[in-house]
Image (cartoon, rainbow, N blue to C red):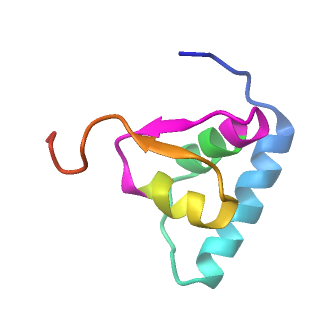
Amino acid sequence: MRQVEIEQADFVRARGVQRALAAQGLKGRKVPDLVIAAAAERHALILVHYDQDFESIAQVTGQATEWIVERGSVD
């Protein structure tokens, strides 16, 4: 996996995405998830995850996501 640095622009983008999600009634996305997604988006990376929040975030950003394993298969 590639490691990327978090930049101030990622916090700004995260805040904007959070507002867009709230406008759609999707509140409660975790700030760390929003920032991670913003950094991945900035680097045009596929966001590999096991967290529905990233799918919700991608509804706003349009970025590529992929469940690391099938949803609901790990507890």
Residue range in magenta is 39-52
Classify 17 as above or below 47.
below
- Give percent across and percent down for residue 31: 58, 51
Q: Give residue 48's position: percent from left, percent from top.
A: 47, 35
Q: Residue 18: percent from the left, percent from the top?
A: 65, 65
**Looking at the image, which residue is at 18% across and 50% down?**
72
68 vs 26: above or below = above
Q: In the picture provided, is 7 more to the left or to the right than 21?
A: right
- Label total for image: 0
Q: Tell me where residue 59 sits by quadrant.
A: bottom right
User: Left or right: 2 with respect to 12?
Assistant: left
30 or 49: nearer the viewer: 49
* Residue 32 image offset from top left, x and y in percent: 56, 43
Question: Residue at horizontal 49%, vertical 52%?
Answer: 54
Residue drawn at x 38%, y 56% as measured from the top left: 52
Looking at the picture, tell me which residue is in the foreground, 7 or 63. 63
Q: Is residue 72 left or right of residue 32?
A: left
Q: Residue at x 50, y 63 (%)?
A: 56
Q: Is residue 13 magenta?
A: no
Q: Can you say whether 68 is above or below 41 in the image? A: above
Quadrant where the C terminus is found in the figure = top left
